[in-house]
Amino acid sequence: MSSQTIFYKTPKDLPREEWFASGHRLCAGCGAGIAARLIFKAIRGPTVVVNPTGCVEVSTSCYPYTAWKIPYVHVAFENAAAVASGVVEAIKILNKKRGRKLHDVIVFAGDGGTFDIGLQALSGALERGHNLLYICYDNEAYMNTGIQRSGATPIGAATTTSPAGKVIPGKQERKKDLIAIAVAHKIPYAATASISHPLDLVNKVRKALEIEGPKVLHVLAPCVPGWRYPPSETVRIARLAVETRYFPVYEVEYGRVKINIRVKEPKPLEEFLKAQGRFSHLFRPENAHVLEALKKAVEENWERLVKLEESGIAL
Amino acid sequence: MARQAQERIAIMGDEAIALAVKQSNVDVIAAYPITPQTIIVERLSEYVANGELDAAFIQAESEHSALSICVGASLAGARVFTSTASQGLALMHEIVYATSSMRVPMVMAIANRSLNAPLNIHCEHGDVMPERDSGWVHLFATNVQEAYDLTFIAFKLSEHPDVQLPVSVNLDAFILTHSVEPLTPISDEDASKFLPPRQPLYSIDFDSPATFGTMALPDTYMEFKYQLKEAAEKAGQVYPEVAGEYARISGRRYWYFNSYMADDADAVVLVLGSTYGTLKVAARRLREGGLKVGVVGLTMFRPFPEKQLVELLKNAKSLIVMDRAYSYGGLGGPLYMEVLAMLYRNGLRIPVMNVVYGLGGRDFRLDEAEAVLKIALDGARRGRFDEHVRWWGVRA
Ligand SMILES: Cc1ncc(C[n+]2csc(CCOP(=O)(O)OP(=O)(O)O)c2C)c(N)n1
Ligand code: SF4
Ligand SMILES: [Mg+2]
C-alpha cells in the first residue's frame, strides 16, 4: 500500500512560515540554503533539526545569531545520525514516562557528513530503526573546508584534492550510490529530490514524515564556488541535472523503485557539464575518455533504475 | 527522614554500577561493549528487557556514536548513562570534549584499562588521563561500595543547576569491575528521593526553540570556555553539599579524598583508585610498628581539590605520588605533575617522588605497598629522595 503522496499541489499550498530564517551567511545562490528553506516549510508540527559540521552549520549557527526558528542541534561532523537517534529515543521514552511533547526529528547533513565520515553513524541509525528523517544536501564535495573531493563527487569533477591535473584529470572514481546503501538497510522509504523541483521535494519531505521508521532523502544542492557558476544559475543547473538524467529523481518505498520525474528525452549531458567550471577540463581532447566514463555512469544508472521500476522487484 | 535499613549483598563492581543506574531514574542508556565494562551494559539491558527498568537501552554501532546518542538524549531532557573503557574512551574523545563544552549532563562509568599498544585489557588509568582537561568531573572509586555510591552522587552533581557538566565514575579494570565485594545498597525509595526524575534546565523544545552547539568565533569563544572553567570549579564547591545529602540517606559520607592517618604522618603516599586499599592495609601494619605513615586516595581528580589537599598535606615531611599512567616524554605521571604544581604554588617545599606502577594490570602487592611507604619514610627522614620518578618493578 502506498502512502499519501500529495500534500502540496501548488507552491501556494506551502505554509508561509519561514523556519529557516533569512540573514544566514551562506553564499548568494547556495543550493543548500534553498533546500533548507523549502524542506523546513514541509514540517508537520513540533520538529527538531540535527545538523553536522559543514557549510550550513557554520553559516547558520554563529553565536550569538541563529537562522533556526526550530530547535537545532550541532555536535560534530560524523555523528548527526547518532545524535538524532538519541534525541528520538529520549523524546519517545519521556513521552511514555512523563507525557513529554513528541517532536519529529530531521537530520540535515552534507554529503561529506553522510557518504563518508558519517556513514557508519548513519548505517547504525538505519539498522536500529529509529523514527527519523535523514536528509542529505548533496553539493558533491566538502565545501566548508574549501571544495575537497568526497564520496559523492562524480567522476571527472575537479576539486581542490582531485584537481584537473595534466596526469590525473579530476576525480577518477565514481560517486557512491547513497540510496542503494540506504535501501540495503531495508528501510521503509528512501528518495532523491532536487531543489529545481520544489513541489516534488516538499511533498517527499512531508510524505516521509508520515512514515514510521528511518527515512533517507538525498537532495541535490548545487554550490556556487564549488561547481563554479554564477549565483543566479543554481536552480537552472539543478534542473539540468535532472533533465540530463545526471541526477534521477526517484523514490524507493518498501524496496520498490518509482521514478518520479520521467526524463523521456534527456538533454545532452554536456549542457549540464558546460554550465560549470568543475567539468571544463573534460572538454579537452586528451580527457575525452573521462567524459565518456561519466556519460557511461549516468546512462547505466538511469537504465538500472528503469529496469528496477519495470521489474517491480522489492530491493 | 529515617533511612531504610538495607541488607548487605555480595556483588562485583560492574554489577554494582548497573544496580545504581537502575535505581537512578535513568531514561536512556547507550553504550558499546568493551572489556571490562561489558557486564555493566549487559545487566542494564537485562533490567530493561525484563521490565525492571523503564528506560531506552541502545547498543550503538561504536563508542563514538554511543556518546553522541547520549548527548542527543540528554539535550532532549533525559537522564542518561553510558560506560566504556580504554579504546572505547579514546574513540569517544572528540565527543567527550563536546559533551562538557556544550554543558550536557550525563554519567559515564569508566572501567579503567590500558590503551593499545600493546593490546592489554587490564587495569591502568592511561585511558581517562587524555580526558583530564575536558571539563568533565572525574571521580575515582577505591572499592565496589564506592563505585555504587559515587554513581548516585555523579548524577546529582552532573545535573546541579550550577554545574551542568558530565561526570565520570572511574573503577579499576578487573580489580573492581570483576571483584565480588560486600555492598550495602540504598533502598529504591531513598534512591528515588535523592534522584527524582530529571528536570532539565534547558532542553530541546519546539515551543521555546534554542540552538545547541553553536559556532563561536574568536570574539566569543573564550567566554564559552571561561564558563566551562567556572562550572568545573563550581562542581568542586557544591560537591560536599551533594555528598552530604547522600550521606543522610546512606550513612556513608564522601569527601574529596579518602585518607588514612595522613594528618599527623611524616610520610604520605597519594594514589588514585583501588590501590588505596592495599596501601591502607600496609600503612596500618607500619603504624603498628610505630612508623608515622599515611595514605590518601583521591576521590575527586577533576576538579582538583587543591585547597583541601594542601590543608591535609601541610605537615607532611615527604610525599610519594603513585601514578598508574604516564606522560611519555613528560616529567612523570599526570597526578605527580599536578601535585608538584600544587605544592609549589602553595609554598610547600617537601621532597616528592613519583612511583609509576601497575601499568597494563601488573600486580601491586601488599609487600610492595609496604616498601613504597618505607621509601616515603626514608625521604622524610633524609629530607630528600634520590630520584624523581621510579618505574616500579620494571625490567629495564
Ligand atoms: C572529524 C572532523 N574531520 C574534519 C573536519 C573538517 N570539516 C569540517 S566541515 C567539513 C566538510 C563538510 O563537507 P560536507 O559534509 O559535504 O558539507 P558542506 O560543507 O559541503 O556543506 C570538514 C572536512 C571536522 N570538522 N571534523
Ligand atoms: S560554499 Fe557552496 S555550499 Fe557552501 S555556502 Fe557557498 S554555495 Fe553554499
Ligand atoms: Mg558537501
Image (spheres, coloured by chain):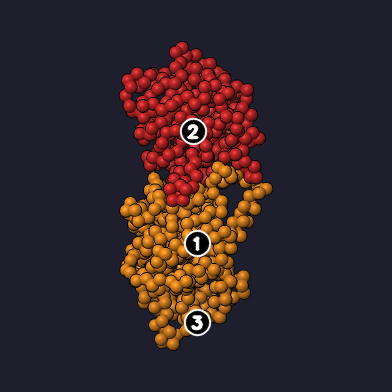
Neighbor class of circle 3 (other Cα within 10 Å; few <14, some 14-19, many 20+) is many
Find disc 1 in the rendering and name its residue: B156
Mark seen at residue B287:
none
A300 relative position to A52: left or right: left
Q: Position of residue A163 (x, y in %)?
A: 53, 29
Estimate the x, y position of residue A304 in percent, counting from the top left. 37, 21
Which amino acid does the dot numbered 1 rest on? Lys
Location of mark 3 (residue): B265
Quarter placement of the C terminus of chain B: bottom left
The chain whose colour is red is A
In the rendering, at what x and y percent does residue B19 appear?
37, 61
Instruction: Name the chain letter of the residue that bears numbered label 3.
Output: B
Front disc: 1 or 2: 1
Question: Which circle marks residue A136 in the picture?
Answer: 2
Q: Name the chain under label 1.
A: B
Query: How far across and down, in percent of the image, does residue A277 sit?
Result: 57, 23
Alpha carbons under labels 3 and 1: distance apart: 34 Å
Residue density around tag 1, few if under 14, some if 14–19, many if 20 or more, within 10 Å: many
Chain B is which colour?
orange
Quadrant position of residue B391: bottom left
Distance in Å between CA atoms under marks 2 and 3: 64 Å
Distance from the alpha carbon under mark 1 to that under mark 2:
38 Å
